[in-house]
């Protein structure tokens, strides 16, 4: 286990059938313009069976977030693409740092979804086939995870990055339609509770598979496996199978769509027009506009840290894969506790002051991270990251919800919020990768993180001043 020690339902097939008609995933088997079946769109709210089926998609796809995006793949990718101490790789004739290519690939995937989500949401609303889009992105994402099984040498780096790209697109794209079902399956007074159930299902499911993979990796010698890459690669394959397999539960029970075929006309650009309306509305709500700009900068830093922390730990500190997996598991627990902690703090001092404390803590983390040299330094930073990562995300969304004007277009404002976040993730990851490639060290990218958080904090100070 050299790389480990040096860095720490029946009938389900691994890939969608070759005979799968991808067009039918979008258009469904029935032309929606011809007498759509009303039963396909009848939704009984607060139905326990339907709610549990919906929450199972969190159980299904959250394994991507832990196994591929956080714990195992980043360290494995770094190890395979580093040959004789050289971390530069060649992609289509271009020499680039391995971690820079990784970061930019993730950023482009989120950027693609930020760009097309208004379009595909409009198409789904028009045709009434939200579940078909959810299924399509699910299969794309799971297939991308399973492609990573074939990545066992540096020459396969381009294949690995393509697999990562499609896994990320599938994950982010399917979430768009998964979230759209929440207000349809439950009443407003139960949405927080049902949403929390989804997160709980996702956490339990993801940690279950991650712990199983950790046990397999740690017992490689006892299982007489000589190939050091096999169990990490198997974890990626199992992630895809798990994702597709358990996704069949929500895909079997959720209604076909949220509304029947729209006979009023085909307006696929409506999603972009709604975003434009929100942007125009922001001109008359300056406090909300300032908050969104602040959110854009500090969430760019938050998400970049969350996606690149494992890569940093392996490359700059030399942490083992087992150490990273344990760290990620502890971060999950700390994140939940931190979210509750800052929810209480916000009730005492207000949301904006609580956010200012959170962003200030992130700046301090960035300053400290620049000087990290030992595993203990990394664990200390990870402890504070865990405390603030859950709190800043949950508090940002709730603060935004409180500041939205009463226009009857709440969905449009939250769509704008979601696109803003995905765009911020793209910018953060791409800029991190460019700086990493330019300087040859991820430590220098941390300086940019501190700058982004500082801009966010200054804007929060301005927002506090505007309140007075």
Image: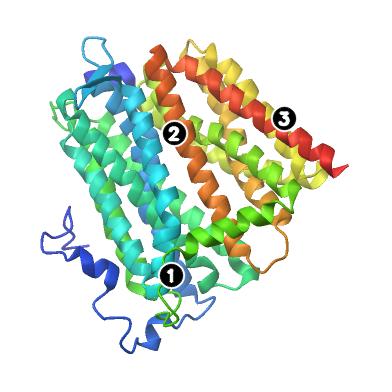
| Dot placed on the residue nearer the N-terminal end, 1 or 3 | 1
- Give the Cα separation between the discs numbered 1 and 2: 36 Å
Which numbered dot is residue 458?
3
Mark 1 to mark 3 CA distance (whole Å): 40 Å
| Residue 169 on image: x %, y % | 35, 48
- Residue 10 versus residue 223 in the image, above or below: below
Percent x, y of residue 412: 58, 61
Q: How many marks?
A: 3
Q: Position of residue 25 (x, y in %)?
A: 26, 67
Position in image of residue 460 (x %, y %): 73, 36
Q: Residue at x 37, y 31 (%)?
A: 104
Dot 2: within a 10 Å radius of its alpha carbon, few (fewer than 14), some, or many (20 or more) residues?
Answer: many
Which of the pair 456/252 is nearer the observer? 456
Q: Which residue is mark 2?
A: 307
The image shows residue 366, relative to residue 277, as above or below, that is above
Q: Marks 3 and 2, Cα distance to the nearest angstrom?
A: 25 Å
Question: Which label's residue is closer to the chain start, 1 or 2?
Answer: 1
Q: Quadrant of residue 335?
A: top right
Q: Are marks 1 and 3 in contact (CB under 8 Å)?
A: no
Camera-nearest label, 3 or 2: 3
Q: Which mark is residue 104?
A: none
Query: Which quarter of the rendering shows the C terminus?
Result: top right
Q: Quadrant of residue 125?
A: bottom left
Q: Identify the residue position indicated by label 1 in the image.
A: 267
For the residues bearing labels 1 and 2, Cβ distance under 8 angstroms: no
**Is residue 199 at least partly visible in the picture?**
yes
């Amino acid at each position: 286990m050299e790389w480990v020690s040096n860095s720490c339902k029946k009938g389900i097939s691994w890939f969608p059938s070759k005979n799968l008609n991808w067009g039918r995933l979008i258009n469904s088997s029935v032309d929606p313009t011809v007498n759509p079946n009303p039963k396909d769109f009848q939704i009984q709210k607060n139905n326990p069976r339907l709610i549990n089926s919906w929450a199972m998609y969190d159980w299904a796809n959250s394994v991507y977030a832990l196994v591929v995006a956080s714990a195992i793949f980043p360290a494995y990718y770094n190890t395979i693409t580093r040959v004789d101490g050289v971390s530069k790789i060649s992609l289509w004739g271009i020499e680039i740092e391995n971690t820079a290519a990784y970061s930019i690939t993730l950023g482009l995937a989120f950027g693609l979804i930020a760009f097309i989500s208004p379009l595909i949401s409009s198409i789904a609303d028009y045709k009434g086939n939200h579940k078909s889009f959810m299924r399509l992105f699910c299969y794309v994402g799971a297939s991308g995870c399973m492609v990573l099984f074939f990545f066992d040498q540096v020459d396969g780096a381009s294949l690995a990055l393509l697999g990562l790209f499609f896994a990320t697109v599938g994950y982010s794209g399917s979430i768009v339609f998964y979230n759209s079902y929440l207000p349809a399956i439950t009443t407003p007074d139960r949405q927080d509770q049902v949403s929390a159930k989804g997160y709980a299902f996702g956490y339990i499911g993801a940690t279950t598979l991650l712990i199983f993979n950790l046990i397999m990796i740690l017992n490689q010698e006892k299982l007489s496996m000589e190939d050091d890459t096999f169990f990490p690669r198997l974890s990626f394959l199992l992630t895809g199978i798990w994702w597709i397999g358990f996704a069949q539960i929500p895909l079997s029970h959720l209604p076909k769509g949220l509304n029947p075929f729209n006979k009023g006309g085909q307006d696929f650009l409506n999603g972009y027009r709604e975003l434009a309306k929100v942007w125009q509305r922001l001109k008359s709500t300056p406090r909300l506009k300032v908050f969104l700009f602040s959110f854009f900068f500090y969430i760019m830093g938050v998400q970049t840290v969350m996606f690149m922390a494992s890569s940093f730990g392996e490359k700059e500190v030399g942490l083992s894969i087992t150490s990273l997996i344990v760290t990620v598991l502890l971060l999950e627990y700390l994140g939940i506790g931190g979210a509750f902690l800052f929810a209480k703090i916000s009730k005492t001092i207000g949301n904006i002051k609580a956010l200012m404390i959170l962003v200030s803590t992130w700046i301090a983390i960035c300053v400290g991270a620049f000087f990290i040299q030992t595993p203990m330094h990394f664990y200390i930073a990870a402890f504070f990251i865990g405390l603030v990562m859950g709190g800043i995300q949950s508090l940002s969304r709730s603060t935004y919800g409180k500041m939205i004007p009463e226009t009857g277009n709440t969905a449009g404002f939250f769509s704008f919020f979601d696109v803003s976040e995905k765009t911020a993730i793209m910018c953060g990851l791409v800029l991190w990768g460019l700086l990493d490639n330019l300087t040859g060290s991820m430590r220098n990218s941390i300086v940019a993180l501190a700058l982004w958080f500082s801009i966010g904090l200054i804007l929060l100070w301005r927002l506090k001043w505007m309140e007075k």
